[in-house]
Amino acid sequence: MIINVKYFGLIAEITACEKETILFTKSNVSEFLELLYKKYPNLENKDFQVAQNQELVTQDALITGNELALLPPFAGG
């Protein structure tokens, strides 16, 4: 399946892009992250959350949509 990936904040700086399209043949978020860690090794030690179709998901969530976003921690106030 084709996944549209969006990167924000520090994550976009590490990947040097704000969005990209990736062909993915596995099934869950953790497997997708393994693929990204191989492509962008500096991501592996960063803190971020993953959203699928604009909803936060856990790493064991199945990929059911075509859009994932990597979101850095947010400052609250």
Image (cartoon, rainbow, N blue to C red):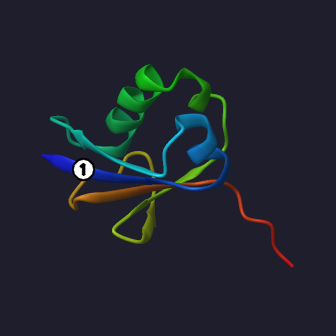
Residue 8 lies in quadrant:
bottom right
Q: Is residue 28 above or below residue 43?
A: below
Which SS class for mark 1?
strand
- For the question of whether residue 55 can be seen, the reply is yes
Quadrant for the C terminus in the image? bottom right
- Determine the residue located farthest toward the bottom in the rendered image: 77
**Three-letter amino acid code at disc 1?**
Ile
Image position, residue 50 (x, y; %): 48, 54
The reply, left or right, for residue 14 in relation to residue 60 is right
**Residue density around tag 1, few if under 14, some if 14–19, many if 20 or more, within 10 Å:** some
Residue 70 position within the rendered picture, expressed as x and y whole percent measured from the top left: 50, 52
The residue that label 1 is drawn on is 3
Q: Nearer the viewer, residue 61 or 52?
A: 52
Q: Is residue 8 left or right of residue 50?
A: right
Q: Is residue 20 above or below residue 24?
A: below
Query: Residue, x 41% and y 31% (percent of image)?
Result: 36
- Residue 28 lies in quadrant: top left
Of 71 and 19, nearer the camera is: 19
Residue nearer the viewer, 5 or 18? 18
x 60%, y 45%: residue: 11
For the view shown, which residue lies furthest in the front direction?
16
Identify the residue at horizontal 58%, vertical 28% (top origin): 44
x and y percentages locating residue 46 in the rendered image: 66, 36
Q: Is residue 62 visible?
A: no
Q: Position of residue 74 (x, y in %)?
A: 72, 64
